Amino acid sequence: MTDLPEKRVTRSWPFKNIGLDYFGPNTVPAETGSRTEVYGCIFTCCVTRLIHLEVVTDGTTEKFLNAFRRFVARREHEQQRSKPKERNTEEPEEDFLDLDYDYEEPENHDDSINTPSYVSDEDNTGQQMCPGHQKKLELETRLTEIKEFLMENQSVPERKISEDNPMRPQERYLVCSFCLAKGRHYSGSCPTYFSVKSRMKRAGCKLCLDSRHNTEHCRNEIRQCMYYRSEKHNKALCTLPEEIQECYKEVEEIEHELDNFKEYYGPRVPPD
């Protein structure tokens, strides 16, 4: 077996020595609603075997040179190139690497960009080049996730004893399972042990909150949680209300940061 070429075994920058080829055609949807054929131009590094892909609409030399310019603009360390033996271009061989040829723009050339309908004008003004754009995308994504969580887990309003909502006659002997306060509040809204973690430490049974036995030996009537109706535990030990409160707080913080986005990250800088 003969030795590999020197450019294949010599340590160098990625894409310093490259090989390229076409593959396709592939059928993709067009802007008009129909389907069209495009080709893929693959650039591969001879040393690291990394690949770089560019989309080409046809097999002409002009479209290839445009794809090659995009590749060079992205990968700076390029020197030697190996082209495929079979070429489908009709232009002369000298044009293959002539990247500095004079290009005459057509008279009726339209350089406007057709943006999709779901992209707003604000997103089409070089916003991706402004400071903090990635941070803004992260905030908007997180805000969407939280709102979906709140829609899927809408909390059932909890009854609280107050002047507008007085205690019922049968609730006069109500005793909190945690602080043993009679006739003041429910175990689920105990002000002394407000967090669910502190309640779970003091409750042995998840159904009746009794600390003398566990759930397996509970003889009381089993009632499902008013928040998670599929799980059988007392609503005082449910973490969903706390999670919802934290979500509302986070939503308020994110919306405040998005409203003052320019103040936090400075004005937008248009692309050069």
Image (cartoon, grey):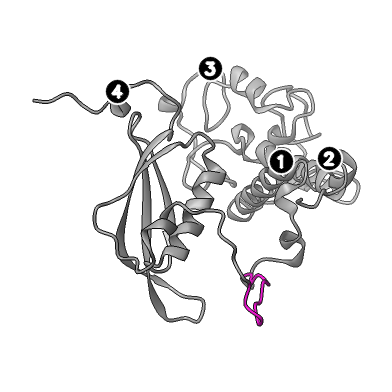
Q: Is residue 23 left or right of residue 183?
A: left
Tell me if residue 5 comes above or below residue 128 in the rendering: above
Residue visible at 49% across and 47% down in the picture: 71
Give how far apart the Cα atoms at labels 2 and 4 are: 47 Å
User: Which residue, given by chain and number where applicable, does mark 1 sit on?
Assistant: 135
> Residues in magenta?
105-115
Query: How many C-alpha atoms fall within 10 Å of the one at disc 4: few (<14), some, or many (≥20)?
Result: few
Three-letter residue code for mark 3: Arg
Whether pointer 3 and pointer 4 mark residues with C-beta atoms closer than 8 Å, the reply is no
Q: Main secondary structure of the magenta part?
A: loop
Query: How many C-alpha atoms fall within 10 Å of the one at disc 2: few (<14), some, or many (≥20)?
Result: some
Tell me if residue 76 comes above or below residue 10 in the rendering: below
Query: Which mark's residue is nearer the viewer, 2 or 3?
Result: 2
Three-letter residue code for mark 2: Tyr
Whether pointer 4 and pointer 1 mark residues with C-beta atoms closer than 8 Å, the reply is no
User: Which residue, given by chain and number where applicable, does mark 3 sit on?
Assistant: 212
Q: Is residue 268 left or right of residue 75?
A: right
Three-letter residue code for mark 4: Val
Q: Tell which of 146 and 65 is nearer to you.
A: 65
- The answer to if 110 sits in the magenta stretch is yes
Q: Is residue 76 left or right of residue 56?
A: right
Tell me if residue 74 comes above or below residue 60 in the rendering: above
Tell me if residue 3 comes above or below residue 70 in the rendering: above
Describe the element under mark 4 as helix, strand or loop.
helix
Three-letter residue code for mark 1: Lys
Q: Tell which of 114 and 259 is nearer to you.
A: 114
Marks 2 and 4, the one that precedes in the sequence:
4
Query: How many C-alpha atoms fall within 10 Å of the one at disc 3: few (<14), some, or many (≥20)?
Result: few
Q: Position of residue 182 (x, y in %)?
A: 77, 29
User: Which residue, given by chain and number where applicable, does mark 4 sit on?
Assistant: 9
